[in-house]
Image (cartoon, rainbow, N blue to C red):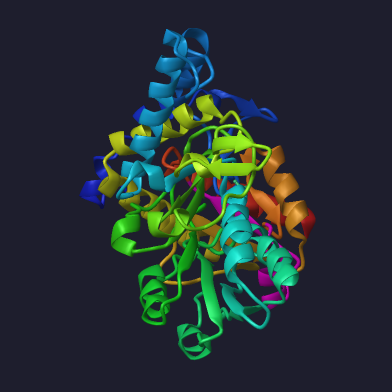
Amino acid sequence: MSPVASNPDVKLFDVEKIRKDFPILSRSVNGHPLVYLDNAASSQKPDQVLDRMDHYYRNTHANVHRGVHTLSQEATDLFESSRSRIASFIGAPSDKEVIFTRGTTESINLVAYTFGLSQLKEGDEIILSAMEHHSNIVPWQIVCGMKGATIKVIPVFDDGTLDLEWFRKNITTKTRLVSVTHVSNALGTINPVSTIIRIAHEHGIPVLLDGAQASPHLQIDVKELDVDFYAFSSHKMYGPTGMGIIYGKSSWLDVLPPWQGGGEMIKDVNWAGTTYNSIPFKYEAGTPDIAGAIGLAAACDYINSLDRNAMVQYEHLLLTTCTEAMNSIPGVKAIGTAADKASVYSFNVKGLHPYDIGTLLDQQGIAVRTGHHCAQPLMDRFSIPGTIRASFAVYNTFEEIEKLVRATHKAIKILS
Ligand SMILES: Cc1ncc(COP(=O)(O)O)c(C=O)c1O
């Protein structure tokens, strides 16, 4: 029996209809129909997103916020209503708590350079985890270096879960911030972020979550999480590249200093000094990516148009089906075996280099990612140079998983 037939909720999930929304899925690669399993790096875009952005540029484009003319007002309305829909997508109490950025990387840098530079001092500590993406490591290394603060790292167990006991013991009066990923891009682990936030808040310490891998898959409610800052990228959740947001509690955003200076973020400028605009504009210097914001809101609308419960179950079934089938291939070893995972199957093949497997999969039309996935400290933790990563989106199918399994068998045979 197919996995779909055995699960009534998943049966309701019409993946063939969804696939028709994504024009790129009908192309072939190296003579094979494309099997796109690199969604954790960037997902494909549906017509609903592409059309909305195209329509904006063809019909409504003008600069926002500073025009009395009709086009500028229409563009401003589209831009601000996009902010509003993105805010409600993540359960933000107020639109002004959503700041547009270029993506997760810029969002984390924004917090590092505003919170970090203003709140950290010599001898302070921040806590990250051993499974962070470089985007949630390097900005903190730079800022902690500038301020004389130290980074402490929550260890990862062999199955790819975090050592929460270590976290409980190592959060101290010197800790100023906890910043961890919601879902690991390299392992797929869904971290127990509610518990992490509760423990941190018991000590009066704010938490930043890197939601880059969570926003395409999980229902996010920043209010219920009570998280202080939440970052994600549009391009991993069916929206355009170069766009993302940082959610921040207004109690933080109101008091932290601005980051980049320029137009839009000011109230008054004169040679004696500058006063700053209120949030969110205080953090949005310069002309924003208007089409990008419209595209991200369209992506949120697209995800909302799906049956979210069925989507989560369907993606989970893709992952468990892939895990079971791939684990049964001789020589294949899964990296990251936590019970709670989202849409990532990372693996290695004994005696073979990830890059060689990835290349042979590509020759068979299958796009996976190979390498360290911008998580070199995590690769060091597992004493591996990298992994081969298959990552799923709403449009992937069980047939595609079968193709991955067959192609992996073939690649191993060729290379052994
Ligand atoms: C967990 C995580 N954090 C941060 C990033 C950086 O995202 P971006 O390159 O969109 O800024 C990624 C991208 O792969 C990621 O997976």
Question: Horizontally, is 343 left or right of 33 in the view?
Answer: left
Q: Give percent across and percent down for residue 20.
A: 42, 24
Q: Note whether 59 is above or below 128 in the view shown.
A: above
| Residue at x 34%, y 36% (from the top left corner) | 85
Q: Give percent across and percent down for residue 414.
A: 76, 52
- The residue sitting at the left extreme is 8
| Residue at x 67%, y 27% (from the top left corner) | 31
Image quadrant holding the C terminus, namely: bottom right
- The residue sitting at the front extreme is 272
Question: Horizontally, is 182 left or right of 24 in the view?
Answer: left
Between 289 and 253, the residue placed more toward the observer is 253
Q: Note whether 302 is above or below 331 in the view shown.
A: above
Q: Residue 107: in sight, yes or no? A: yes
| Residue at x 61%, y 79% (from the top left corner) | 125
Q: Give percent across and percent down for residue 252.
A: 44, 59
Instruction: Specify the segment rendered in magenta.
Output: 374-392
- The number of callouts visible is 0
Between 312 and 114, the residue placed more toward the observer is 114
- The residue sitting at the bottom extreme is 169
Q: Residue 242: in sight, yes or no? A: no
Q: Is residue 402 magenta?
A: no
Q: Note whether 255 is above or below 157 in the view shown.
A: above
| Residue at x 28%, y 61% (from the top left corner) | 224
**Corner quadrant of residue 186:** bottom right
Q: Give percent across and percent down for residue 117.
A: 64, 64
